[in-house]
Image (spheres, rainbow, N blue to C red):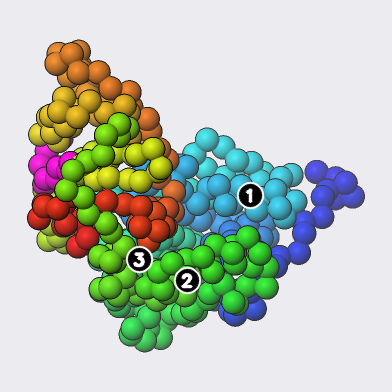
Amino acid sequence: MNAVTAPVPRLMEFPACLLPILHPKRFKIMHGGRGGGKSHTVAEVLLMMGGSLKLRVLCVREVQKSLKESSMQVLRDYIDKLGLGEYYEVLKTEIRHRFNGTTFGFSGLQDHTADSIKSWEGADIVWVEEAHSVTAHSWQILIPTIRKAGSEIWATFNANLETDYVYQRFVKNTDPDAWVCHVNWRDNPWFSREMDTERRKLQALNDDLYQHIWEGKCRSAAGLMFKRKWFKFYDRLPPRLRLYLSSDYAVTDEQDVDGREPDWSEHGVFGLDESGGTYIVDWWSGQVDVDVSLGAFFMLAKKHKPTLAFDEAGVIHRALSPARNRKMRETQTFIGIETLPSAGSKAERALGFAARCAAGSVYLPHTDRPTRLLDQ
């Protein structure tokens, strides 16, 4: 490329408290709530470093069902924002510098074993995104694998529980090889008016959840629950409800390597009345394999005849679809399936429903069974 015609990259802009990210350190740990600029800063710095040095950068998280769930998009955004399109080529599964050989790869830690991860030994920098969700088992495989001289492990996360491995090791305890920075929205000079509006709304709605999402505090026992006082109860369902069926299928019905309980599969039947009130009509849950979960799905579909069913988009939906479609034909129980993307943390995804609950428009039946919803 002719140096005269090459585009001039824009200057980096990020919160001052994150400036030490530019200095060498084995572990660089950035934690805090939304709007602090953690992921954006990491993307900017890595792209600029990768432009001046040949680096092998790995971007990982515990579970990565597709590249849409990886950090690839934020890197693509900053390639455009910083005017680096002439330097970086975005390929199907990686990002590559056109001239010096820097590469960015993307992977889910859950998909690897101690043997399969050995190919990462030559990495210069590993960026662990949503590090709070990475299991102790994955950390204990990852850290000793990244052994190249001068290699670094960067982690960004919003603390979830005090028992999370990354929080215990780097935040609660002191690691002399780690730089640890707590950064929140107030540290970000570019925090937008739109985000501040959302922040204030949640603060007024649920301070426990606010402290977790925006202030980066570990979730309290109270913050893990919806407030019982928000809910209303019914003895009889109103007429002319529009019924919907929503499902969340477990990834596995077996105990994981850390000894944690297997996942739960859940099916809920919800009704909407003419004024927008939401009624919890029926519920099923179980720590079972997929065949049993599908059987429960069709049991509820036959019983309630919902207008539509909802699934989370992604790998599990694609894997289930053939068996579910076959079961529809066998049982002559047909129902439309709408997939919804999964974006943000579980707490963030619950905000819309939490707002409806706080407004007093969610109704539970007067039975003991559905009240376990309040304790999850």
Residue 133 screen position, x and y as percent = 32, 61
Q: Which residue is mark 2?
A: 203
User: Which numbered disc flags the more N-terminal residue, 2 or 3?
Assistant: 3
Q: Which residue is mark 3?
A: 132
Q: Residue at x 15, y 28 (%)?
A: 303
Q: Nearer the viewer, residue 37 or 103?
A: 37
Q: Residue at x 67, y 56 (%)?
A: 51
Looking at the picture, which amino acid does disc 1 mark? Answer: Asp
Is residue 272 highlighted in magenta? no
Left or right of residue 162: residue 338: right
Looking at the picture, which amino acid does disc 3 mark? Answer: His
Left or right of residue 287: residue 125: right
Is disc 1 placed on a helix, strand or loop?
Answer: helix
Is disc 2 placed on a helix, strand or loop?
Answer: helix
Q: Nearer the viewer, residue 180 or 252?
A: 252
- For disc 2, the neighbor class at 10 Å (few under 14, some 14 to 19, many from 20) is some
The Cα atoms of the two marked residues, 2 and 1, are separated by: 29 Å
Residue 310 placement: quadrant: top left
Is disc 3 placed on a helix, strand or loop?
Answer: helix
Q: Which residue is mark 1?
A: 77
